[in-house]
Image (cartoon, rainbow, N blue to C red):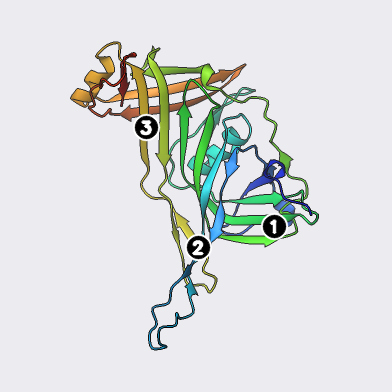
Amino acid sequence: MVWASNANIQLVMDFEDTYGTSRTASSRAGFKIPFTSCDLKEDQTSQQSKILGSGRHAAKPFYGNNVVSGTLVGPIDNGAVIGYILKACFGVPTTTGSADPYTHTFKIGTSTPSFILEKGYTDLTIPEYFLYNGCKIVGISFSFTPAGQLIYTAQLVGAGETAGTAAYQASPTDLRYPANIYYPCNALISEGGSPVTNIEELSFDYKNNTVLGYGLNGTGKATAASEGGPTIEGRIKAMFDSMTILAKGQAHTESSLSVTCTQSTHSFSCYADELEYDHKTPVINTPAGVYLDL
């Protein structure tokens, strides 16, 4: 018996030209991406029938829509993330520069592209593939901490799942071995436009708030997707060494935060240019140093 191993699974991603529909075979441009985990799945939950009249025997259950959702977690790198994950979340970037390193700037747009994601269990005697059409990134988060690998967490939804023994594409581009992976130890943080050294942890949580529409088409699968109003939240853990940041929270003063990680001649940056801190004074709970948690 051959038991499928998560270590050997491959994830293939490609953008769609029409929502919920794979590109034609001749125009497919899939790519294998590095990842840490992916729990994207289709769930069609059985529901108890409320029909009465047949005594105390339970009536036959029924099934609702096919709901595709889950999370994709992976490393921040120069290939899959800069080229594709951020495009899926924000849309096509503005690119400047005449030679490598180029500058790709992603901002909130009016819509985001849909894509396919395929989980391939290639170590089985007969490989099995689960293809998800109409995928959208509902939201994405980044967390910069002193320890651990720098990763993104993307919340996904999709239109439907197709299972089979044929791969989406025979030879997709392989991005699983990136030359540049960014680490928290490379991070430099600026607060209010000036570099600071007292922030130990910083997280950004961005949401497109995408919703799916389930038109009655006889399949129970989503037929459309639309982005909602975006939201951005975050958190900092900072050494309490002055009133500078705390005073902004008390007075509801607008500020900004940016973090940049650099590897060789390339870098990855997150920038929130209009934010306000909660008003939350530091607490006394250990004999160690005092922190702001805002």
Secondary structure at badge 1 equals: loop
Give the position of the C terminus as an image quadrant: top left
Q: Amino acid at mark 3?
A: Gly
Query: Would residue 28 be seen by someone viewing this image from the given angle?
Result: no
Q: Are marks 3 and 1 in contact (CB under 8 Å)?
A: no
Tag in front: 3 or 1: 3
Which residue is rendered at x = 36% and y = 23% of the image?
237
Secondary structure at badge 3 equals: strand
Q: Amino acid at mark 1?
A: Thr
Q: Are marks 3 and 2 in contact (CB under 8 Å)?
A: no
Q: Earlier in the sequence, mark 3 or mark 2?
A: 2
Give the position of the N terminus as an image quadrant: bottom right
Which residue is rendered at x = 31% and y = 29% of the image?
275
The image quadrant that residue 204 belongs to is: top left
Q: Which mark is residue 24?
A: 1
Horizontal arrangement in the rendering, residue 146 relative to residue 115 (left or right): left
**Percent of width and height locating residue 76:** 57, 30
Label 2: how many Cα within 10 Å (few below 14, some 14–19, many 20+): many
Q: Nearer the viewer, residue 244 or 6?
A: 6
**Percent of width and height locating residue 99:** 64, 23
- Residue under numbered circle 3: 234
Q: Which mark is residue 222?
A: 2
Q: Nearer the viewer, residue 134 or 186?
A: 186
Q: Amino acid at mark 2?
A: Ala
